[in-house]
Amino acid sequence: MIIPVRCWTCGTQIGDKWEEFSRRVSSGEDPGTVLTSLGLKRPCCRRMLITNVDFIDELIEATTQSSPSEAVG
């Protein structure tokens, strides 16, 4: 999933915060602390980043490996 530009519930801009959130969490910081420091205090905005599954690279790889006739059949 590609992170949306805005929160689906309240409309707050969140797309620009994904890269820093992802980098800091993968380096070992607590996700809650990172979200607070990024200024995301509403539960709806926080869930947009916490529940995001970044599988776009896997999806692209899977699509390029299979041919269109395999997908239909």
Image (tube, grey):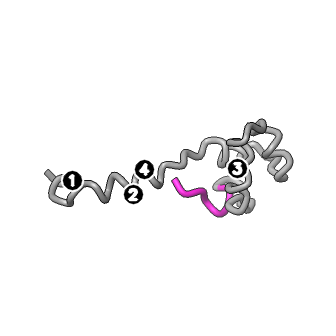
Question: For residue 58, which numbered disc appears in the image?
Answer: 4
Residue type, numbered disc 1: Ala
Question: For residue 60, which numbered disc appears in the image?
Answer: 2
Horizontal side of 51 relative to 1 (left or right) equals right
Mark 3, secondary structure of its residue: helix
Residue type, numbered disc 4: Glu
Q: CA distance from mark 4 to mark 3?
A: 19 Å
Residue type, numbered disc 2: Ile
Q: Which residue is mark 3?
A: 23
Mark 4, secondary structure of its residue: helix
Question: For residue 32, which numbered disc appears in the image?
Answer: none
Q: Which residue is mark 1?
A: 71
Cβ–Cβ under 8 Å for marks 3 and 2: no
Mark 2, secondary structure of its residue: helix
At which x and y percent is residue 28? 74, 37
Q: Please report the bounds of the magenta region as a residue range.
A: 1-7
